[in-house]
Amino acid sequence: MNRDELGDLLKRSFGFESFRPLQREIMEASLAGRDVFALLPTGGGKSLCYQLPALIRPGLTVVVSPLIALMKDQVDAMDVMGIPATCLNSTLDARESQRRQQKLARGEYRLLYVAPERLMLDGFLQDLRCRHIALIAVDEAHCISEWGHDFRPEYRRLTELRDILPKVPILALTATATERVRYDILRQLRLQDPAVYVGEFNRPNLTYRVVAKHRPYDQVLAFVRARPSDSGIVYCQSRRSVEQLAERLREDDVPARPYHAGLAAEDRNRHQELFLRDEIRVVTATIAFGMGINKPNVRFVIHYDLPKNIEGYYQETGRAGRDGLPADCLLLFGAGDTVKYAQFIEQKADPNEQVIARRQLQEIVHYAESARCRRIDLLGYFGEEFAAEDCVACDNCLSPKETVDGTVAAQKFLSCVYRIREKSGFGVGLNHVIEVLTGAATEKIRRWRHETLSTYGVGLEHSRQEWAAIGRELMRLGLVQQTAEKFSIVELTAQGRTVLSQRTAVTLSRQMAPPASDAPASASGKSQRAERAGRIVCDEMLFERLRRLRKHLADERNVPAYIVFSDVSLRQMARDVPRDERAFARITGVGEKKLAEFAEVFLAEIATHAEANRAM
C-alpha cells in the first residue's frame, strides 16, 4: 500500500484528514514486518498505529491491554466506525466468550483486545498458533518495566512471546518512559532490530500552574465552579481525602464521585462509567484512576496533593485535553505534603527504594518551587529541550514570580555550608544548616560546637521556612547539591564555591505566598498559547445543542458520548455549519460509517438551530 492509499483509508475509516506526528512512519515500519517501539505523548494517537494497519494486513492483530475498561472503550469505538473488533476478558459469561471465540475462529475480527494474563494462558496461546496472527501490539508497554511508574508483574510473562510466536512482529507503545524504562521495554520484549520512534513530550494545549495550598477545598471548589460545563479529575494522596472531597463537592452541587483501590470493584466501575458518560463532572481519585481512561474531553486535572514523582505527574496531567483542545493542569503545593511523603519513604523496607523515592521527591519539589518555565523543567526531565524561552502557557510565564537580589542570603547560606564542613570534617543536612543560620540551641549544635561558627545566628532576618526555600532554590541553581540517602547532606558544588569566593551576584525568586483570595489563579481564562493550540471559535449555543444530541445518541447505543463524536468534531460543526452530506463529510472524525449513520440527524439539528436564529 502506498502513502496515498494509507491516507485515503485514514479518512474513509477514521474521518481524519492527516496523520499526527510519527503515526505514518510507525505504521509503515510495522506494515513492513519490523518490530517497533513507539513513545508518543498521551493524546498523540498511539491506538491508531495498530488499528489502521489492522484493516490492511491479512490476519488478526492482537492488542495486549492492561485494563478491561480500556478494552471495552476501544471495541465500542471500533464498532461505531464499522471496524470488526472484540475483546476477551473476565467480565464475559461463558456463553458470550464462546460466541466471540467462534467468530475469531471464523476470521470475522481484525482486532482482538486481551489482558496479558489471558494471552499467556497455555490453551489460549495454542489457539492463537492455529490462526494467522499478523501483529502483537503491547499497549501501555511501560507496565513491563519495574522502573516504570505503573509496573504490572503480569506483563513480565510477555517476554515469552518471542519464543512462542517467533515470526510475529511486535509493536510496543507507551506514552511516558525515561531512558531506563525504554531500554527495559526493548530488553523484556526482546524486540529484534526495532524501529524506534520517540515523539515530543510537549503538550502545547495544556496550561500548567502551581498554586500555594491555602484552604485547598475552597480553591478546588472555586476552580470547578469557574468551569461549569467542563469535566475533570482531582488527584489526592489518600483514600480518605478522595472520599471527603467527593462528598463535599456533592454537598456544594458539583456532581462528583470517588475512585480508589479500596472501593468495591462494582463501585469503581460504576463511578468510572458515570464519568465517561458525562453523568458526573468530577472524579476525585488516587493514582489508581487514570491509565486507560480514553475520555478525550477532560478539561482539567487538579493535584490536591503533591505527586510522588515527575513522571507520574506528567502522565496524570496528560489525561487532560487528549482531544487537542485547551485544558488546565493545577497543582496545589504545600510544605506539609513534602513532610508526609518523607514519612512514607521512611516506611519503605528496601533502602534502595528509599533512595530512589527521595530523589524523586526532590525533583517534584524543585519543579513545584521553580520560577522557570514549567514546560522547560517538565520536558527537560525527559531529556527534551523546549526551544522557546517563554511557553505562554504556565503560571511562571504568564505571571513571572517577583525576583529579588539574593546575593547576601546566598552568601550566608553557602558560607554556612562551607564553615560546617571546614570545622567538622563532614557535611550535614539542610535542617541543620538552617538551625545554625537561625541560632538554634540544639543538642547537635552544642555537641559539634557549631555555635562557635562565624555563620551562627547570622540569618535571623529570615524564618526557617524561608531559609528552606532559599536552600532549595540554590540547589535548583546548581550552587548546592543534596544527597538522597536517609541522612542526606548538602554540599557546595564547584559552581557554588566559585560564587562564594568571588561574591557573584545571585538573583532569587520571592517565596510563593498563598493567594489573596480563595480562588486559585488558574481559575482565570485560557492562556494565549492554549488559545493558539486548538481553540475552535464557534457558535456556542449550537455546540451545546449538538452536545445534547450526541449524549442522546450515545445513551441509545450504550456508549460514552465521545465514541459518537469528539468535542473537536462538534465544535467544527458549530463553526462550519454544514448544510449537506458533502460538507458534513469534511468534518474531522467523520468516516464513511459515521457519515451514513449520523449525518442526517446532525444536519437536521444544525438546520433547526439555523432556522430558529433566523426567526429571532
Image: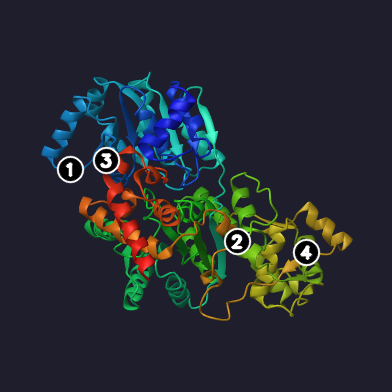
Task: Work out whether 173 lies above or below 319.
Answer: above
Q: Position of residue 80 (x, y in %)?
A: 28, 43
Alpha carbon of mark 1 to alpha carbon of mark 4: how far? 64 Å
Query: In terms of depth relative to the viewer, which is nearer, 144 or 316?
Result: 316
Instruction: State how the image is colored.
Output: rainbow
Contact? badges 3 and 2 (CB < 8 Å): no
- The label shown at residue 528 is 2
Per the image, label 2 sits on a secondary structure element best described as helix
Task: Write down the quadrant of residue 410 in the picture.
Answer: bottom right
Q: Position of residue 487 (x, y in %)?
A: 60, 59
Depth check: give the residue in front, 554 or 317. 554
Q: Which mark is residue 92?
A: 1
Q: How many neighbours does mark 2 have within 10 angstroms: few (below 14), some (14-19), or many (20 or more)? A: few
Q: Amino acid at mark 4?
A: Leu
Q: Is residue 292 left or right of residue 95?
A: right
Of callouts 4 and 3, the N-terminal one: 3
Separation of disc 1 and disc 3 at Cα? 18 Å
Would you say 351 lies left or right of 377 here?
Answer: left
N-terminal of the two: label 1 or label 2?
1
Residue 79: image tag: 3
